[in-house]
Amino acid sequence: MFVLLFFSVATVVWFFIGGAQSSYVISPTEFQFRYIDDTPMGGNTKGRVYTKDDGSVALECELGSAYRWPFCEVAISLSPSVTHGIDLANYHSMIIEAAYKAPAPDQRLRVYLRNFNDAYSITEDPVSMKFNGIEYNPTEEMSEIVLPLNSFQVLSWWISDLDIPLEHAGPDMSNISLIEIATGSAPTVGKHELTIKNIRFEGVMVTEAGLFRSLTFIWLATATVLLAVKYLQSRRVYDLERRRANRLKAINTALKQQSETLSIMATTDALTGLRNRMDIYPELEKALASTDGKNCTALCLDIDHFKKINDTYGHDMGDRLLICTAEVLRESVSTSDVIIRWGGEEFVIFCPNRNLAQASFLAEKIRAAFETTDWPHDAELSCSVGVSSMREGSIAAMIADADDALYRAKQNGRNRVEVFAESFIATV
Ligand SMILES: Nc1nc2c(ncn2[C@@H]2O[C@H](COP(=O)(O)OP(=O)(O)OP(=O)(O)O)[C@@H](O)[C@H]2O)c(=O)[nH]1
């Protein structure tokens, strides 16, 4: 930004001290100055163009009266070919340093800047080159006259004689191949002497409006580029942050899944796939809350003489029998019941939707199923079951009651169902 500011200030200073000025000098050493008069039209004017010792060019002629519009002039060819002139469109003034002596006062001079354009000019006809012309009052003494190029006008006879269309009727300085400085349109016959010391065109490489337009454009372009760079940078940061957030989200999801898996593993019995008793109470409370809470019962089930089975058939067979027991239980319960491997060979079935009679019925059904199941050790297997119902709103107390009833079932000979005594009272 500092560089741009410095550049802008320097450019403006350069412009106002005249750095943008340009000039184009027409010197006799570089260009050919020729003499032309009215003799081809039948006139009797005589004269010549020559270079003086001081380097200035002189036009001398004796204007005769044989031709209706007598004239003499100096013609300066700006290029070897008329078709390829010089572009003077960017110049604002033509400056002629000259002295003019005429046989009468107030004699004027005509200046033509002849433009070639394929639209209306042909090489064979010099008249077809556009006459951008002006007529001015020269001085007798050597002096500089400034002719503003925007004061030049196209000669009306040229427009009408050549039937020039409107779009080409205006001045055009873009391809000037010939300059003509001639005696005025109504000259007095007699001796005319024109000494030209210097001809030059002056202009500016860039106008003030153009300069400020360019600087504004450069500032806008720079601001746009800087904004674009800033946008791309913040976009890159945003993309990085988003990728990072996505990565963290993925890690988070994986950790959550892992945590859920670990939680499931921690609360699931690896051998039977049943729920174990870890953190079981909130889950049972939740199951109870989904019912009307009036008929909540629990079963405590224990396989009879399991130690003996282990001892007789081995621990692996014991495991297989535990797995089969889980299957028997699954097949016996309904979807609202929750089977829990309470520990070892002991199971709890939580029934949030069964009354005492229904729970007792289920207990008996399971006990009977043990008798009819084909066990993998090809021997009989029985279980004892204790049943209880909710007394004081405590699930833990209800399970403890069922366990008491189970203890009684064991005491009373096993392979039987016992209902916790106070559950009956509560039911009545
Ligand atoms: N195979 C196997 N045995 C287990 C497992 N968990 C506990 N046991 C065994 O189960 C047996 C339970 O024995 P006890 O508590 O004495 O009860 P019981 O032999 O079933 O006798 P009663 O319950 O009084 O009928 C123990 O020998 C434990 O080692 C297990 O996951 N797999």
Image (cartoon, grey):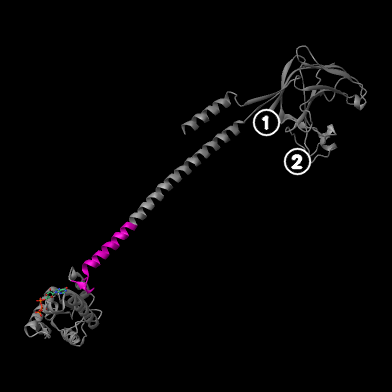
Magenta stretch bounds: 250-276
Q: Give the secondary structure at mark 1.
A: loop
Give whichever of 418, 199 is nearer the camera.
418
Per the image, the residue denoted by label 2 is 167
Residue in the foreground of this view, choosing between 242 and 69: 242
Nearer the observer, 192 or 21: 21
Q: Which mark is residue 90?
A: 1
Q: Is residue 110 left or right of residue 291?
A: right
Quadrant of ligand 1: it is bottom left
Above or below, 341 against 146 in this view is below
The quarter of the displayed image where residue 328 is located = bottom left
Asked if 163 appears above or below 64 in the picture, the reply is: below
Please say whether residue 252 is one of the residues in the magenta stretch.
Answer: yes
- Position of 96 with respect to 189 (left or right) is left
- The answer to if 403 sits in the magenta stretch is no
Q: Quadrant of residue 94?
A: top right
